[in-house]
Amino acid sequence: EDQVTQSPEALRLQEGESSSLNCSYTVSGLRGLFWYRQDPGKGPEFLFTLYSAGEEKEKERLKATLTKKESFLHITAPKPEDSATYLCAALDSGSARQLTFGSGTQLTVLP
Amino acid sequence: DAGVIQSPRHEVTEMGQEVTLRCKPISGHNSLFWYRQTMMRGLELLIYFNNNVPIDDSGMPEDRFSAKMPNASFSTLKIQPSEPRDSAVYFCASTISGGAPDTQYFGPGTRLTVL
Protein backbone atom coordinates (compact mmCIF):
# COMPACT_ATOMS: atom_id res chain seq x y z
CA GLU A 1 0.00 0.00 0.00
CA ASP A 2 1.28 3.47 -0.91
CA GLN A 3 2.30 5.61 2.04
CA VAL A 4 3.40 9.21 2.37
CA THR A 5 4.70 10.55 5.69
CA GLN A 6 5.50 14.18 6.39
CA SER A 7 7.57 15.62 9.21
CA PRO A 8 7.49 17.59 11.33
CA GLU A 9 3.75 17.93 11.88
CA ALA A 10 4.22 21.56 12.85
CA LEU A 11 7.12 23.98 12.56
CA ARG A 12 7.53 27.47 13.97
CA LEU A 13 10.25 29.67 12.51
CA GLN A 14 11.37 33.21 13.03
CA GLU A 15 11.31 35.37 9.94
CA GLY A 16 14.54 34.75 8.05
CA GLU A 17 15.23 31.41 9.74
CA SER A 18 15.70 28.82 6.97
CA SER A 19 14.57 25.22 7.40
CA SER A 20 13.39 22.11 5.57
CA LEU A 21 10.24 20.02 5.51
CA ASN A 22 10.46 16.29 4.90
CA CYS A 23 8.23 13.97 2.87
CA SER A 24 9.07 10.27 2.80
CA TYR A 25 7.18 8.01 0.45
CA THR A 26 6.69 4.32 -0.17
CA VAL A 27 5.29 3.52 -3.59
CA SER A 28 5.99 0.68 -5.97
CA GLY A 29 6.98 3.03 -8.78
CA LEU A 30 6.98 6.80 -8.49
CA ARG A 31 5.49 8.68 -11.43
CA GLY A 32 5.52 12.03 -9.70
CA LEU A 33 5.92 13.76 -6.33
CA PHE A 34 3.76 16.83 -5.81
CA TRP A 35 3.99 19.69 -3.33
CA TYR A 36 0.98 21.82 -2.47
CA ARG A 37 0.43 24.77 -0.17
CA GLN A 38 -2.86 25.08 1.69
CA ASP A 39 -4.01 28.23 3.46
CA PRO A 40 -6.79 28.07 6.07
CA GLY A 41 -10.21 27.83 4.47
CA LYS A 42 -8.81 27.30 0.98
CA GLY A 43 -8.06 24.43 -1.34
CA PRO A 44 -4.53 23.10 -1.88
CA GLU A 45 -2.52 25.27 -4.26
CA PHE A 46 -0.07 23.52 -6.57
CA LEU A 47 3.62 24.34 -6.08
CA PHE A 48 5.86 21.74 -7.73
CA THR A 49 6.02 18.38 -9.44
CA LEU A 50 9.22 16.30 -9.26
CA TYR A 51 9.62 13.28 -11.50
CA SER A 52 12.97 11.64 -10.79
CA ALA A 53 15.64 11.39 -8.10
CA GLY A 54 18.07 14.28 -8.20
CA GLU A 55 15.57 16.71 -9.64
CA GLU A 56 15.20 20.15 -8.04
CA LYS A 57 12.67 22.93 -8.59
CA GLU A 58 12.57 26.44 -7.18
CA LYS A 59 9.97 29.12 -6.71
CA GLU A 60 10.82 32.29 -4.82
CA ARG A 61 11.96 31.18 -1.34
CA LEU A 62 11.02 27.53 -1.88
CA LYS A 63 13.12 24.75 -3.33
CA ALA A 64 11.94 21.16 -3.66
CA THR A 65 14.31 18.23 -4.04
CA LEU A 66 13.75 14.53 -4.60
CA THR A 67 15.64 11.35 -3.71
CA LYS A 68 14.57 7.76 -4.21
CA LYS A 69 12.80 7.69 -0.86
CA GLU A 70 12.23 11.29 0.21
CA SER A 71 11.48 14.78 -0.89
CA PHE A 72 12.47 17.95 0.89
CA LEU A 73 10.94 21.39 0.73
CA HIS A 74 13.61 23.91 1.65
CA ILE A 75 12.45 27.33 2.77
CA THR A 76 15.09 30.03 2.61
CA ALA A 77 14.70 33.21 4.66
CA PRO A 78 10.95 32.69 5.16
CA LYS A 79 8.49 35.51 5.60
CA PRO A 80 5.24 35.53 7.60
CA GLU A 81 3.29 35.15 4.34
CA ASP A 82 4.90 31.73 3.89
CA SER A 83 2.85 30.49 6.86
CA ALA A 84 0.58 27.69 5.62
CA THR A 85 0.21 23.94 5.62
CA TYR A 86 2.45 22.24 3.07
CA LEU A 87 1.23 18.95 1.64
CA CYS A 88 3.12 16.45 -0.42
CA ALA A 89 1.55 13.72 -2.51
CA ALA A 90 2.88 10.76 -4.48
CA LEU A 91 1.55 9.36 -7.72
CA ASP A 92 2.23 5.65 -8.11
CA SER A 93 2.85 4.33 -11.59
CA GLY A 94 0.26 1.63 -10.93
CA SER A 95 -2.42 3.91 -9.51
CA ALA A 96 -3.67 5.67 -12.62
CA ARG A 97 -4.20 9.22 -11.38
CA GLN A 98 -4.77 8.63 -7.68
CA LEU A 99 -2.56 10.78 -5.48
CA THR A 100 -1.62 9.59 -2.00
CA PHE A 101 -1.33 12.61 0.29
CA GLY A 102 0.70 13.06 3.44
CA SER A 103 -0.87 14.65 6.49
CA GLY A 104 0.97 17.93 5.98
CA THR A 105 3.37 20.21 7.85
CA GLN A 106 1.84 23.29 9.40
CA LEU A 107 4.40 26.08 9.06
CA THR A 108 4.21 29.26 11.11
CA VAL A 109 6.66 32.07 10.41
CA LEU A 110 6.80 34.67 13.15
CA PRO A 111 7.70 38.29 12.37
CA ASP B 1 -8.91 31.87 -16.45
CA ALA B 2 -11.37 30.55 -13.88
CA GLY B 3 -10.19 27.77 -11.64
CA VAL B 4 -12.26 24.92 -10.28
CA ILE B 5 -15.58 26.22 -8.99
CA GLN B 6 -17.44 24.60 -6.12
CA SER B 7 -20.80 25.38 -4.57
CA PRO B 8 -21.99 25.93 -2.01
CA ARG B 9 -18.96 27.08 -0.02
CA HIS B 10 -20.65 26.27 3.25
CA GLU B 11 -23.51 23.90 4.00
CA VAL B 12 -25.15 23.29 7.34
CA THR B 13 -27.80 20.61 7.46
CA GLU B 14 -29.49 18.27 9.88
CA MET B 15 -28.89 14.58 10.15
CA GLY B 16 -30.98 12.61 7.68
CA GLN B 17 -31.20 15.37 5.09
CA GLU B 18 -29.94 15.06 1.54
CA VAL B 19 -26.89 17.13 0.62
CA THR B 20 -25.70 17.90 -2.90
CA LEU B 21 -22.29 19.40 -3.58
CA ARG B 22 -21.45 20.80 -6.99
CA CYS B 23 -18.28 21.21 -8.99
CA LYS B 24 -17.31 22.83 -12.27
CA PRO B 25 -13.85 21.73 -13.42
CA ILE B 26 -11.39 23.86 -15.33
CA SER B 27 -12.40 24.11 -18.96
CA GLY B 28 -10.58 21.53 -21.07
CA HIS B 29 -9.72 19.26 -18.17
CA ASN B 30 -10.94 15.71 -18.64
CA SER B 31 -10.33 14.17 -15.21
CA LEU B 32 -12.20 15.14 -12.08
CA PHE B 33 -11.63 14.08 -8.48
CA TRP B 34 -13.68 14.36 -5.29
CA TYR B 35 -11.77 14.46 -1.98
CA ARG B 36 -12.77 14.74 1.65
CA GLN B 37 -10.53 16.42 4.22
CA THR B 38 -10.76 16.00 7.99
CA MET B 39 -8.33 16.66 10.79
CA MET B 40 -8.19 12.98 11.67
CA ARG B 41 -7.77 11.47 8.21
CA GLY B 42 -6.34 14.29 6.10
CA LEU B 43 -7.17 14.32 2.37
CA GLU B 44 -8.93 11.20 1.13
CA LEU B 45 -9.86 10.47 -2.46
CA LEU B 46 -13.51 9.51 -2.76
CA ILE B 47 -13.97 9.01 -6.49
CA TYR B 48 -12.53 10.13 -9.77
CA PHE B 49 -13.87 10.45 -13.30
CA ASN B 50 -12.08 10.35 -16.61
CA ASN B 51 -13.94 11.71 -19.62
CA ASN B 52 -17.12 11.80 -17.51
CA VAL B 53 -16.88 8.10 -16.63
CA PRO B 54 -16.36 7.00 -13.02
CA ILE B 55 -13.06 5.10 -12.92
CA ASP B 56 -12.57 4.28 -9.25
CA ASP B 57 -15.10 4.82 -6.47
CA SER B 58 -13.39 2.60 -3.92
CA GLY B 59 -12.92 5.60 -1.64
CA MET B 60 -16.64 6.30 -1.37
CA PRO B 61 -17.36 5.45 2.27
CA GLU B 62 -20.86 4.04 1.97
CA ASP B 63 -23.85 3.64 -0.27
CA ARG B 64 -25.12 6.90 1.15
CA PHE B 65 -22.57 8.64 -1.08
CA SER B 66 -23.03 8.92 -4.83
CA ALA B 67 -21.38 11.01 -7.54
CA LYS B 68 -22.29 11.86 -11.10
CA MET B 69 -20.69 13.67 -13.98
CA PRO B 70 -23.38 14.23 -16.63
CA ASN B 71 -21.06 16.32 -18.83
CA ALA B 72 -17.51 17.62 -19.02
CA SER B 73 -18.28 20.81 -17.12
CA PHE B 74 -20.33 19.62 -14.14
CA SER B 75 -20.21 17.05 -11.37
CA THR B 76 -22.19 16.43 -8.20
CA LEU B 77 -21.51 14.58 -4.99
CA LYS B 78 -24.63 13.58 -3.09
CA ILE B 79 -25.01 12.32 0.44
CA GLN B 80 -28.36 10.80 1.34
CA PRO B 81 -29.07 10.54 4.21
CA SER B 82 -26.40 12.69 5.80
CA GLU B 83 -24.87 11.87 9.21
CA PRO B 84 -22.82 13.97 11.64
CA ARG B 85 -19.68 11.96 10.79
CA ASP B 86 -19.93 13.25 7.22
CA SER B 87 -18.94 16.70 8.48
CA ALA B 88 -15.76 17.64 6.63
CA VAL B 89 -14.44 19.84 3.85
CA TYR B 90 -15.11 18.38 0.42
CA PHE B 91 -12.80 19.33 -2.42
CA CYS B 92 -13.11 18.89 -6.12
CA ALA B 93 -9.99 18.83 -8.31
CA SER B 94 -9.43 18.55 -12.03
CA THR B 95 -6.59 17.82 -14.42
CA ILE B 96 -5.76 17.05 -18.02
CA SER B 97 -4.74 13.44 -18.40
CA GLY B 98 -1.72 13.00 -20.58
CA GLY B 99 1.75 11.55 -20.82
CA ALA B 100 3.33 13.44 -17.92
CA PRO B 101 2.11 12.89 -14.37
CA ASP B 102 -1.04 14.91 -13.99
CA THR B 103 -1.14 18.02 -11.84
CA GLN B 104 -4.44 18.30 -10.02
CA TYR B 105 -5.90 21.75 -9.45
CA PHE B 106 -8.20 22.10 -6.48
CA GLY B 107 -11.32 24.13 -5.91
CA PRO B 108 -11.95 26.19 -2.75
CA GLY B 109 -13.93 23.40 -1.10
CA THR B 110 -17.33 23.02 0.52
CA ARG B 111 -17.39 22.96 4.30
CA LEU B 112 -20.19 20.60 5.32
CA THR B 113 -21.58 20.52 8.82
CA VAL B 114 -24.18 17.90 9.67
CA LEU B 115 -25.93 18.54 12.98
Image: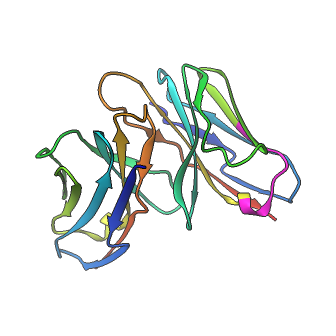
Q: Where is residue B21 in the image (x, y as percent from the top left)?
A: 71, 42
Q: In this view, does B65 lie to the left or right of B1?
A: right
Q: Residue at x 50, y 29 (%)?
A: B26
Asked whether residue A66 appears in the rendered view, the answer is yes
Color style of the picture: rainbow
The C terminus of chain B - image quarter: bottom right
Q: Which residue is located at x 26 percent, y 65 percent?
A: A21
Residue B53 percent coordinates (x, y): 60, 22
Q: Which residue is drawn at 73% across and 62% down?
A: B85
- Is residue B16 depicted above or below B24 in this figure? below
- Report which quarter residue A32 is drawn in: top left
Instruction: Specify the segment rendered in magenta.
Output: B77-85
Up-down: is B36 above or below A19? above
Left or right: A47 as drawn, with respect to B23? left
Can residue A110 be spotted in the picture? Answer: no
Q: Specify whether B90 is left or right of A34.
A: right
Q: Horizontal and vertical percent for residue A95?
A: 42, 36
Viewer-side residue, A25 vs A17? A25
Task: Identify which residue is drawn at 62% across, 41% down.
Answer: B6
Q: Which is more toward the observer, A4 or A89?
A: A4
Asked whether residue B114 is drawn in magenta, I would say: no
Q: Position of residue B113 (x, y in %)?
A: 73, 61
Tell which residue pokes out farthest to the left in this image: A54
Q: In which quarter of the image is the N terminus of chain B?
A: top left
Residue A46, by quadrant, is top left
Tally the numbered discs: 0
